[in-house]
Amino acid sequence: MRGTIALVLLLAACVQRTTARDRRIEPTYADTSAIEAMARELSSDAMRGRGPWTPENERVARRLAAQLEQLGARPLFGDALLVPFVAGDRTTETAYNVAGVLPARDGTTDGDLVGITAHLDHLGVGEPDASGDSIYNGFLDAAVPMAIVLDVARRYALVRGDRPLAVLFFNLEEQGLLGSRALVARTDAPSVLGRLRLLIGVDAGSPAGEAVEWQLMGALPEHAGARLADSLARMRGWTTNATPPRPISDVFVFSQRGVPILFPIPGATWRGYTEAERAEAMRRFDHYHRPADEWRPDFPWVGTAAHAQWLWEIVRSAADERVMLR
């Protein structure tokens, strides 16, 4: 118990700790307007569902790389933020992951890393639904998660930590985690994997409300990052349930290489929602792997804001050298 109390007190200190410069610029909340704008762009009809091995898919990868470059990210692999690879039986077709690292407050990218990721691909164009819509836009899966990751990266660029932040966008997740598998298979991957002390996967966010219970996939066997996320959740009045890694996200591939991972999944209890209200919200807004998973002007952002804020607090605290992640 004393260890848990000490961790909570340390986390509170880490969240509050700022330099004189930090106090002038530290972003207090997630920028949901920017998250919405980016998610709307990435899931627009013009992106044609970010289908695998399409010009639109590459266009999204280049857009994300440009955003990271503007934030000051450096290549994590090779000499570019765009990391080409081939996968499966398409040996003549190149796809792109995006992998960058934001330097720590001392300006270096050396030493231990904290990482955050979302996948950039979706299903592309397929069979039309009853309305005739054939574009699988992938708004919640995973344009919103990509935009959340960029929001965390933006905030880190303003208030850097002691540990650098690796930001990764994987391709071909929908094809069987092919992009992440290609990345960890690189000959230069071990030097990066050995420095990653925590990798957070962002995909399943609260679609319409603030979830107050979360499954932490990858938190078993227990590791320091899992304890960190749980403590910060409890500070928000939430509860968590730890489960082992499962092959449902790109971070699973990293767990198989010994990297501590977290993949938060929201539960069925939302703050301020009755069971019936939550069911109605899911009916209206949760259209997993269907053309209807697209931006809507009435989409509520309260759940996204809470999720993004929690992720920022995890990253901000994990980047503090006083928080032991080994």
Image: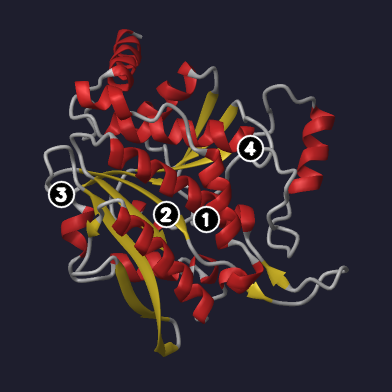
| Other residues around mark 4 within 10 Å, as few (<14) / some (14–19) / many (≥20) | some
Q: Earlier in the sequence, mark 4 or mark 1?
A: 1
Q: Earlier in the sequence, mark 4 or mark 2?
A: 2
Q: Are marks 1 and 2 in contact (CB under 8 Å)?
A: yes
User: Which residue was labeled with disc 4?
Assistant: 301
Give the amino acid type for the residue marked by disc 2 in the picture: Phe
Q: Earlier in the sequence, mark 1 or mark 3?
A: 3
Residue in the image at 28% along x and 15% along y = 13
CA gap, disc 1 and disc 3: 29 Å
Residue 123 in sight here = no
* x and y percentages locating residue 279 in the rendered image: 80, 37
* x and y percentages locating residue 199 in the rendered image: 34, 46
CA gap, disc 3 and disc 4: 33 Å
Residue 109 image label: 3
Mark 4 or 2: in front is: 4
220 is higher (above) or lower (below) than 323: below
Which residue ends up furthest to the bottom in the rendered image? 92
